[in-house]
Image (spheres, helix red, strand yellow):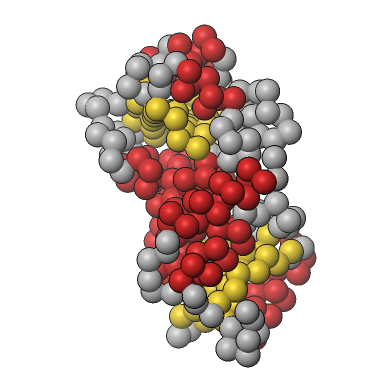
Amino acid sequence: MITGNTQLLGVIGYPIQHSLSPVMHNAAIDSLGLDYTYVPFAVEPQCLEQAIAGLSALGVEGFNVTIPHKQAVMPLLSEISPIAQAIGAVNTVYRTAAGWGGTNTDVVGFLTPLRTHALQPGAIAVVLGNGGAARAVVAGCGELGYSQIAIVGRDRTKLEQFLCQGTFSKGVSIHLWSELVTLLPYAQLVVNTTPIGMHPQVDQSPLSQAELDRLPTHAVVYDLIYTPHPTLLLHQAMERGLEAIDGLEMLIHQGAAAWDYWLQRSAPIAVMRSALHDYLSASR
Ligand code: NAP
């Protein structure tokens, strides 16, 4: 029930209707009986500055930031964490004494499902795509200890810009898709950060069956996409006996990490996961 004491959390983006964050955060809030509610706010790019001031004036406790505001919000904040500065994007905003603070929980969201995996000596992480999410993935792979991270893209100029714009660890290299076949036999981790295979293009995959066959048997295939669930890429990887991780895990863990900033408590991860699974099954 919303009362006069209810505190506000939320997410800004444009469009925002597709966001699953309200589903998982409100389920988590309800399960703990907290007097909070999490609201999606559609903020057009030209209204961003006004919206940030408005969220402050309305007493909102904290909020997530999604496409297209992850970079644009940065100059509007009073402080930015080192990880968000290194990636060049903010996805979580919280209150500080000086105003809004911003950080990036996509990195921890990405790497949490991989924390228990032992790294093989000389293992390569192959990252497909060089957009916004790839920045968090490359930073996460560096934090996991990968000494070789190969970024695969379709435009050499964009790949070079990607390298120039981030503060990445040594051992990050850029490649065109034509070079992918030579990388796959050495890959311990392959991460799809492109939208290939996302609803409604559910019959597409960034890797052909022949490319999947080149992966070693201990390789982990991680797809950032969460609709469909699983993607064709993950379905084929599992058929081949490879470990598959879907984008819902990253979504859940980046959301859970935001609770440390907003509520100074752990999020009920199992509740969030179950709410998302139920919601996606019902909307199929
Ligand atoms: P983005 O900034 O638009 O980047 C997309 C990347 O994919 C670009 O490098 C783009 O290449 C490449 N790409 C697009 N279509 C391609 C194609 N047909 N062939 C080859 N490359 C292609 O998007 P983003 O924000 O990084 O998001 C990427 C994906 O990750 C989306 O599916 C998004 O839903 C998902 N995501 C999931 C989570 C999660 O929590 N699970 C979080 C963030 C993002 P060019 O640069 O050459 O255009």
| 215 and 145: which is toward the camera | 215
Furthest toward the bottom, the residue is 4
| 140 and 264: which is toward the camera | 264
Please give the name of the residue rendered at 71% of the width and 57% of the height, measured from the top-left corner.
Answer: 16
Location of the N terminus (image quadrant): bottom right
182 vs 99, left or right, is left
Q: Residue 220's x, y, as percent?
A: 39, 28
- Residue 106: in sight, yes or no? no
255 vs 241, left or right, is right
65 vs 266, left or right, is right
| 226 and 67: which is toward the camera | 226
Q: Residue 137's x, y, as percent?
A: 45, 42
Q: Quadrant of residue 133?
A: top right
248 vs 122, left or right, is right
Asked if residue 77 is positioned above or below residue 187 in the image, the reply reads below
Furthest toward the left, the residue is 121
Please give the name of the residue rendered at 35% of the width and 17% of the height, measured from the top-left corner.
Answer: 217
Q: Residue 218's x, y, as percent?
A: 32, 22
Q: Quadrant of residue 281?
A: top right
